[in-house]
Amino acid sequence: MSLFGFLGGKKTSVGLDIGSGIIKLVLVDHSGAAPELVKVATTEVATDAIVEGEVMDPGLVADAIQGLFSTAGVKQKAVVTAVGGRDVIVKKIQMDRMKESDARDVIRWEAEQHVPFDMANVELDFQILDPEAEGLQMSVLLVAAKRELVESRVTLLSEAGLQPAIIDVDAFAIHNAFEVNHPDAMRGVVGLVNIGHEVTNVNVLEDGVPVLTRDLSVGTRRFREDLQREKGLSADESDRVITGASQSVDMGSYVEARGEEIAVGVERAAAFLATSSRSASGLGRVYTSGGGARIPGLNEVLANRLRVPVETASPLQGLAVRDDVFETINVDEVAPLLMLAIGLGLRRAA
């Protein structure tokens, strides 16, 4: 499912995650029996150039993207990227059972009942979740994004000399990588919590299907600001503390406070799903990813509050990786950052 574009039969996919703090690029080769990760590159983006996913300085960000492609030696111009945030709605709905071709004709009318946007300015897509089931109603996963959001991403890529092969949704791309690397988590109700620089994406899966997403306005930037404000640390020092590279400061109180915010967001998402789903099972497990997954003690705080097992998801656990990919990069440091980028790189037309 994608909001824009078609990748065609290309043998390699370039996944481009334009994050608020770090831009991530991955190259995935699809020519073999299984996808293979062949290149990873990252670059930091200037502070406040991107705020909560919104590009505030397109020229600066485009320059950063161009520099990243040049440094990585990637010449392919067609990329797979994603949008997310408050201007994207993902919702599981019920509608009269019909063929997919017929559903495509009426989905915009159905979306009017569920999406608080002007339908004249929205990009829509959907997926039938139970195509083989019987009955008068079917479950449909609906995604809607403001057209302005999609168009601004296309414009940014154009300024960087690139073209969008596919514009995906953050939550679906993260799920894509998660499904490949954690197939054992495709049963029951599972929370996937991607903790980025400014925003934490909560993606609730039910039997492997992403049925609910929520964005929380808390990320690693909040942890850094806590340390800088209350401990007088520099930006570099606070960065080392929250990534676990330095233990010079006790992070306990900060992790408790910010972890509580994230846990409440997960609880609310799970509670909403419980009231709107026929499933009687509650949240069974949570996986964290993103830069925040590296914060010492955060998984433990979440586990204590949510009373379910919490562990860090790996975007590399079930993926073939070419030998030289991490020769100059610390794989343990960068791996948690790559879930979204790898999910994008795994996208390929059937």
Image (cartoon, grey):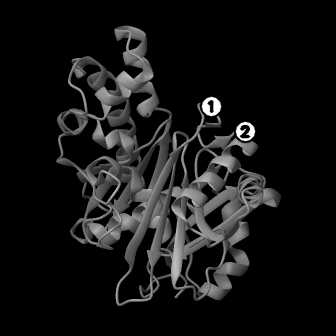
Up-down: is 181 above or below 103? above
Q: Amino acid at mark 1?
A: Asp
Q: Secondary structure at mark 2?
A: loop
Front position in the image: 306 or 155: 155
Mark 1 sits on what residue?
A: 48
Relative image position of residue 135 (x, y in whole percent)? 46, 83
* Occupied quadrant, residue 156: bottom right
Say if 60 sits above or below 3 in the image: above
Q: Is residue 210 visible?
A: no
**Rendered position, 236 above or below 177:** above
Amino acid beneath label 2: Asp
Rendered-image quadrant of the N terminus: bottom right
Assess whether mark 2 and mark 1 are in contact (beta carbons under 8 angstroms): yes
Left or right of 190 in this view: 239: right
Q: For numbered disc 1, what is the local secondary structure?
A: loop
Residue depicted at x 30% and y 20%: 254
Q: Earlier in the sequence, mark 1 or mark 2?
A: 1
Where is residue 298 drawn, in percent x and y?
Answer: 25, 34
Camera-nearest residue between 231 and 5: 231
The label on residue 57 is: 2
Q: Residue 89 is drawn in which quadrant?
A: bottom right
Query: Left or right of 229: which side holds 231?
Result: left
Which of the 4 image quadrants contains residue 323?
bottom left
Residue drawn at the location 66% of the way across and 70% of the way down = 77
**Left/right of residue 37 with respect to residue 83 in the rendered view:** left
Q: Residue visible at 29% across and 68% down?
A: 181
State the image coordinates of residue 50 (x, y, percent, origin top left). Answer: 63, 39
